[in-house]
Image (cartoon, grey):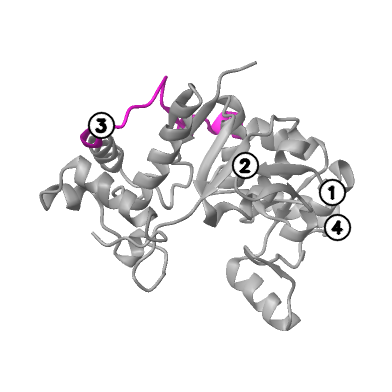
Amino acid sequence: MSSPVTRFAPTPSGPLHVGHLLAALQARRVADELGGRCLLRIEDIDITRSRSREWVELMYEDLAWLGLRFDGEVMVQSERFGVYAAVLDQLRSLGLLYPCFCTRSEIKAQIAEMGRAPHSSLGYLYPGTCRHLPPDVVAERLARGDAHAWRIDMQRVQDLIGCPEWEDQYRGVQRCVPVEYGDVVLARKEMPASYHLAVVVDDAAQGVTHVTRGEDLFEATHIHRALQAVLGLPVPLYCHHELLKDNAGKRLAKRDGARSLASLRAAGYTPQAVIDSLHAALANNGIWQA
């Protein structure tokens, strides 16, 4: 039986903040409690969000300042484009992908015309405009170089795999119904692989057995379970922990002014003081006071 493996996988789109710290500590804690390893992965696949190498270097500084340690080599998603391309080819060979030529504004307009459009907790579902385009039209538009994304046909996925289960440590066994989450995008020009595809492929490649992450990603795990079933990949145990919040109960995030670790360090906080503040927040329904 393989030893337990967790991972911390930040996106270098800005300085690490206290929410990142919570995720890192949870991953390290689970690994230590189980006598396993905690890996570090840099999720920089989205070139529109991931910025310069400076953010990565600052991240390493923050983690070193906190005394957080990780095991093994660091995986960097931007070095794995070829791996994701091969997986996309595999899905195409199964007849599960189709090119979508709709722009975001066109999709919004289509949804508005539908009135009460179908949606999931992840947002409105893509209405399927390009799902059944005639093959000659698709070939012509691809040959012309029209901008497009690659979507996965969830009805075909469900026909192939049914409704597989997965387990969350805090919520128990869950049943994945692929069609409820719509034909999500798995790749586009500026994003060689979506988060959904890359995280599933990379968790399997790194042998991750326990995925610890925020409860905001709970619904996305249904999509990940569907991809695991299609690709024949192992299924980790998921542990979706609570998020840090402000006094109004709103989730802390960079755009909402969450304190960056660098700013806390500059303000004179010690690593232990930051960690103590985090533990105090968790004991107070996740309300961050520092």
Quarter placement of the C terminus = bottom left
Label 2 neighbour load within 10 Å: few <14, some 14-19, many 20+:
many
The kind of residue tagged 2 is Leu
Rendered view: 56 above or below 31: below
Label 1 neighbour load within 10 Å: few <14, some 14-19, many 20+:
some
Q: Which mark is residue 67?
A: 3
Question: Between marks 4 and 1, how big is the CA–CA gap?
Answer: 22 Å
Q: Nearer the viewer, mark 2 or mark 1?
A: 1
Label 3 neighbour load within 10 Å: few <14, some 14-19, many 20+:
few
Say what secondary structure mark 2 lies in: helix
Q: Nearer the viewer, mark 4 or mark 2?
A: 2
Quarter placement of the N terminus = top right
Look at the image and say whether residue 161 sits in the magenta stretch. no
Look at the image and say whether residue 74 sits in the magenta stretch. yes
Q: Is residue 11 left or right of residue 193?
A: left
Where residue 193 sits in the image (x, y, percent)?
Answer: 58, 43
Q: Which residues are magenta?
A: 64-84
Say what secondary structure mark 1 lies in: helix
Which comes sooner in the sequence, label 3 or label 2?
Answer: 3
The kind of residue tagged 1 is Gln
Q: Are marks 3 and 2 in contact (CB under 8 Å)?
A: no
Rendered view: 28 above or below 97: above
Where residue 248 sits in the image (x, y, percent)?
Answer: 37, 74
Residue hosting label 2:
197
Q: Which mark is residue 134?
A: 4
Residue 169 visible at all: yes
Where residue 109 sits in the image (x, y, percent)?
Answer: 65, 78
